[in-house]
Amino acid sequence: MVTMFARHHVNDYSSWKRVYDEIAPVRKEKGVTGASVHRDVNDLNTITISHQFKNLDGAKAFADSEELKAAMARAGVNGPPEIWFTEDVERTSN
């Protein structure tokens, strides 16, 4: 399992979230198996998102997809996102 993290600043969280929710079918189609959204406690318009994938190829394909780039533009993302990939090693409930 692989997790892709993306961090970026947006013009307005509510506007960004509306677009993020609209593209849920695209995320599923592109192989996202789970996700989470986080807001910076000092700047509520700085967002970190995690998306889980079965493999790195799927994660990279999603990160490079035109659908994602178009959605970020519509959602008011300021500048290029910081994106990184991790191999999931362990998950715990506490």
Image (tube, rainbow, N blue to C red):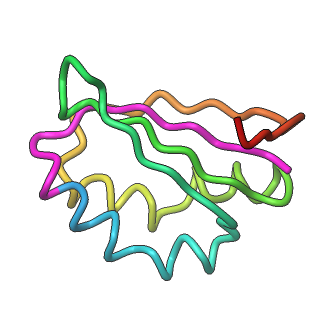
**18 or 67, which is in the foreground?**
18
Q: Position of residue 42 (x, y in %)?
A: 20, 17
In the depicted structure, whether residue 16 falls above or below residue 28: above
Q: Relative to 1, say whether 80 is above or below.
A: above
Q: Quadrant of residue 47?
A: top left
Dominant SS in magenta: strand
The percent coordinates of residue 88 (x first, y second) are: 83, 39
Quadrant location of the C terminus in the rendered image: top right
Residue range (magenta)? 1-15
Which residue is at 63% across, 30% downward? 84
Instruction: Return the residue nearer the eye: 17 or 11.
Output: 17
Residue shown at the point (49%, 37%) measured from the top left: 6
Queried whether the magenta region covers residue 12, the answer comes back as yes
Splitting the image into 4 quarters, where does residue 54 fall?
bottom right
Residue 56 higher or lower than 65, as above or below: above
Residue 11 is left or right of residue 51, and the answer is left
Image location of residue 32, percent across then percent down: 65, 65
